[in-house]
Amino acid sequence: MAVTMNDVARAAGVSLKTVSNVLNNYEFIRPATRQKVLDAIAELGYEANLTARSLRSGKSRMLGLVVSDLSVPYYAELASRLMTVAAARDYRVLVEQSAATRANELTALQGSLSQLTDGLLFTPLALDADAVAAARRGTKPLVMLGEHIDDPRFDLVTMKNVGAAKAMTAHLLAGGRRRIAVIGASPEDRAGSPGLRLAGYREALAEAGVAFDPALIVPSEWRRDGGSTAVARLLDGGQPFDAVFGLNDALALGAMHELLLRGVRVPEDAAVAGFDDIDEARFSSPSLTTVAPGMNEIAERSVQLLIDRIEESGKAAEGTHVEAQFELRIRASAP
Amino acid sequence: MAVTMNDVARAAGVSLKTVSNVLNNYEFIRPATRQKVLDAIAELGYEANLTARSLRSGKSRMLGLVVSDLSVPYYAELASRLMTVAAARDYRVLVEQSAATRANELTALQGSLSQLTDGLLFTPLALDADAVAAARRGTKPLVMLGEHIDDPRFDLVTMKNVGAAKAMTAHLLAGGRRRIAVIGASPEDRAGSPGLRLAGYREALAEAGVAFDPALIVPSEWRRDGGSTAVARLLDGGQPFDAVFGLNDALALGAMHELLLRGVRVPEDAAVAGFDDIDEARFSSPSLTTVAPGMNEIAERSVQLLIDRIEESGKAAEGTHVEAQFELRIRASAP
DNA sequence: CTCTTTCGATACATCGTTGCAGAATGCAGG
DNA sequence: CCTGCATTCTGCAACGATGTATCGAAAGAG
């Protein structure tokens, strides 16, 4: 069927092991021998069987990526970049969707995904740090993405949630907005993306001497329809506001959709800001002011960190925590 | 390290092969023996090593998916559904991005992706049918997605491009529009998604007795920014039009963005229609009229077809061609 | 009561690669 | 001339599973 090392060895007149040595850049091979082998490989069109290599070496050169749902634009863009970065280092990415359920996240940690890959990029949503620590079998490297888990036991690559939300809120305040609604958090949230971003919001308010009003904080699923229903609730509740800060872009876009539908002008009557800077944000009408969380940096650093852990094999120091730099993207929805 | 079949066999007091037989549902095993083995498996927490199984059996239970770019919403949603459908049949999906270049598409067909998987779901963009046929090595099943290749040699799952574009155009005509600009095709396009959708457009025009005006057909990359620059070109060229048909939703949304920016009211001054019904279309402002191309059906049928080919192993009939049913989604941008 | 068939379980080879130990060669130094 | 060491290459075992052949025991046929 397929060409094997044995065929190459026969064609080159050397032993099978020498072919292996050539492929693995073993030091002590005469240039002439190496060339014979390379010629035979080229002539026969040999390609190494990755499954056999993986069985024997215990490495698959695959990274697992666990996200809740690949059709969420943020995760789709993240996955795309992670793949590109990994490919540059000759690794592949195998994606698994968890639907943000405990059961699926546990399966991803323990099941065949972690068996097939050399390490995991994990976006925990349902599990907390202890659950992950307990569930983890073996010693395959694990890098956390996002902010749900912030624990010294784990490597973590994330964004500056507090700082970015604070900067965005400060921007809205500087534009003269005083009643800034927040969509996607509960007033009592302290942890995870909602809690951290809300903390940044409160810090900015405090520095500007503006009182925090829990009535302006509207919890919601982080989806477009959540944004629109949240705005509907605000408007129907007669709650006055002059800006909406959606804790991600989907929320902000859903919110903006509902505002315009109801005849509220953006940004004249209410400014709208988001978080993530998905591609769509540039092309909404009006274009969306948002936070670019440094996704390139997140992709680059997380893959790098994971591969370092895989290849250093063992000397696991304390968990490394990386925070990517953010930038505000000031557009028409909140100039 | 990990628990192997040998450990299970020892614990259960049977041979290694009996453990294998239990796992593979071999018929002739005494219930008592089977139970002993299952108990040992449960007690030791044994899980089959997929790499070894794959090496020995030649099957990996992985499907390859080749798309140009996973961050394109249509592909992201498609990938997400394909994964879900495949998972229900105990298959995994390994995604590879081709960036729509010849070199990458060839690599995907010939390289390690096809080696690692049992079959490929392939969205050709740069290669034509002959190039694919020539590049294909071995006999691993290959199912085409999309419309770039329509050839009896290959299995194909696609959407009703002509019919759907015709129906959408008819809808715009029924709304009284007579100068319908098309973004994303050249007047001379005949094949691929642009050509097929343009053909549907022309059929609808012909049936309504409206003349085809090539000046209204604007070629463009199928991205949001392509949509906005195309509209800019139309407006700057002084070309009158009363509707814009973006050949995908990204184009339509980019177009709508530019129209609104320039003070053209949607739908009063110009209706806008798209194609794909990505999630975003429901939440744009105004919400986007578009074609739902039956993505669920595409995902379902293509995975089913590919797995059938993999498991029937051999009796490759003629290429099967499947066209999913479409539906128009009439929203605010073109009521 | 023997012979054949079916059932239930086993041993061994095998998939294609890499790790380990060691053989053969050449060259320097004593 | 022999020893010692670096260099170059080789053979065997192993990774963890499955396919094939086979073997003993039990069941059914004559």
Image: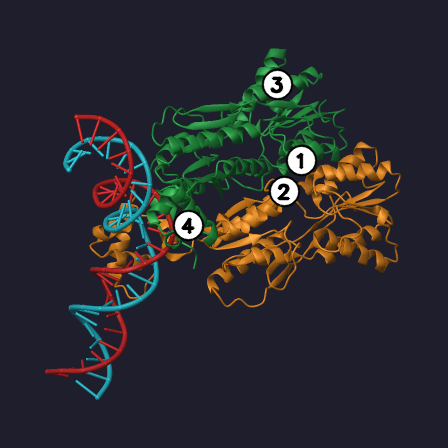
Chain colours: A green, B orange, C red, D cyan
Residue nearest the observer in this picture, D11 or A222: D11
Could you give the CA–CA distance between mark 4 and mark 2, rounded to whole angstroms?
A: 34 Å
Earlier-in-chain disc, 4 versus 3: 4
- Is there CB contact under 8 Å for labels 1 and 4? no
Q: Pointer 2: residues within 10 angstroms few (<14), some, or many (20+)?
A: many
Same-chain status of marks 3 and 2: no
Q: Mark 2 falls on what kind of element?
A: helix
Residue B3, given in percent of the width and then of the height, sits at 28, 45
Q: With B285 as the anchor, is C19 left or right in this view?
A: left
Q: Residue at x 73, y 51 (%)?
A: B194
Residue occupying image coordinates x 71% and y 22%: A242
- Same-chain status of marks 2 and 1: no
Where is residue B308 drawn, in percent x and y?
50, 62
**Residue matched to label 2:** B73
**Circle 4 is placed at which residue position?**
A49
Question: Are dots 1 and 4 on a single chain?
Answer: yes
- Please rate how many residues cluster around mark 4, counting C-alpha atoms within 10 Å: few if below 14, some from 14 to 19, many from 20: some
The residue carrying mark 1 is A280
Residue type, numbered disc 4: Asn
Look at the numbered discs 2 and 1 and tell me whether their residues touch, using CB distance below 8 Å.
yes
Three-letter residue code for mark 2 = Pro
The quarter holding residue D30 reads: bottom left
In space, the residues marked 2 and 1 are separated at their CA atoms by 10 Å
State the SS at label 3. Answer: helix
The chain letter under disc 4 is A
- Same chain, labels 4 and 2: no
* Numbered badge on residue A167: 3
The secondary element bearing badge 1 is classed as helix
Amino acid type of the residue that numbered disc 1 sits on in the rendered structure: Glu
Chain for disc number 1:
A
C-alpha distance separating marks 3 and 1: 22 Å
